[in-house]
């Protein structure tokens, strides 16, 4: 978190069925949308990984759902022209199995380069987690309240919604917007990072506005 007194910075939120619904989450016939055993699954990287995914789903009789996660830069290499082919293939496997799924789009360090080329302001830092193999590497993320970043990110959210929101098996999404290396709500927070965030002005208020904006948009 940027500051320990702001716990919402580290909350990972699932928005059920592209809408904010009070608990418990149910559909019209009062059956819960999300119950049982769920797993996190990266979008298969190649044909071998995809075949393993197909096989695993086929034999996972006790599995109730899959959180399918993928980086923004992987599905949209050119502004406004996302390629959903790999997501469609994975979703087709889940549909064939009648399995519910969640979509998780990761921005942060996985933001496409065209966003910066279009003028989005960048925040440069280093990976300091000693448990990562790339510790010490420099990394760039967009400033979450930058209007150029927000314009492009809002568009891809809308496009995902247009493609998958009507699928009854797509029961939730992960709220992402202000991210670092993962889908969790963590931003760089080393002392030098905190000083640079503070130099940007009232970053706490601006970040809260980002969360409010994308809570609505993911819904």
Image: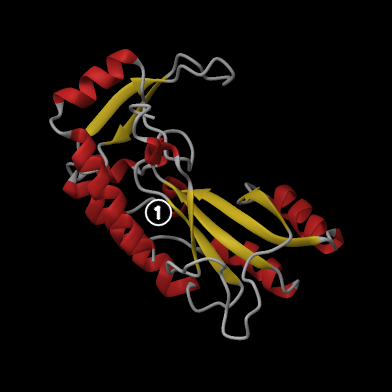
In the displayed structure image, the side of residue 60 where residue 69 appears, left or right: left
Which color scheme does this rendered protein use?
secondary structure
Q: Quadrant of residue 10?
A: top left
Residue 141 shown left or right of residue 132 in the figure: left
44 vs 61, nearest the viewer = 61
Query: Which element carries disc 1, helix, strand or loop?
Result: loop
Q: Note whether 154 is above or below 162 in the view shown.
A: above
Question: Relative to 85, does residue 197 appear above or below in the rendering?
Answer: above
Where is residue 125? Give x, y as percent.
33, 21
Name the image quarter holding the C terminus.
bottom left
Residue at point 23% right, 36% down?
A: 204
Q: Nearer the viewer, residue 164 or 38?
A: 38
Q: Say which quarter of the image contains residue 1.
A: top left
Residue located 36% across and 23% down the image:
189
Place of residue 152 in the rendered image (x, y in percent of width and height, measured from the top left): 27, 54
Where does residue 213 sit, x and y in percent of width and height? 27, 56
For disc 1, the marked residue is 76
- Whether residue 124 is visible to the viewer of this picture, yes or no, is yes
Query: Which residue is rendered at x = 21% and y = 21% of the image?
Result: 196
């Amino acid at each position: 978190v940027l500051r320990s007194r702001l716990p919402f910075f580290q909350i990972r939120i699932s928005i059920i069925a592209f809408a904010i619904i009070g608990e418990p989450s149910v559909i019209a016939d009062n059956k819960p949308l999300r119950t049982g055993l769920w797993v996190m699954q990266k979008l298969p990287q190649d044909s071998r990984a995809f075949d393993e995914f197909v096989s695993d789903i086929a034999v996972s009789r006790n599995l109730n759902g899959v959180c399918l996660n993928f980086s923004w830069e992987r599905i949209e290499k050119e502004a406004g022209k996302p390629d959903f082919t790999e997501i469609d293939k994975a979703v087709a496997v889940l549909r064939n199995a009648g399995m519910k799924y969640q979509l998780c789009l990761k921005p942060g360090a996985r933001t496409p380069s065209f966003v910066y080329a279009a003028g989005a302001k960048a925040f440069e830092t280093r990976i300091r987690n000693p448990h990562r193999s790339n510790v010490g590497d420099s990394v760039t993320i967009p400033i979450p309240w930058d209007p150029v970043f927000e314009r492009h990110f809002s568009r891809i959210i809308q496009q995902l919604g247009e493609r998958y929101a009507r699928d009854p098996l797509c029961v939730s999404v992960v709220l992402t917007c202000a991210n670092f290396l993962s889908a969790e709500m963590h931003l760089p927070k080393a002392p030098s990072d905190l000083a640079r965030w503070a130099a940007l002005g009232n970053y706490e208020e601006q970040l809260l506005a980002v969360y409010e904006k994308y809570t609505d948009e993911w819904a």
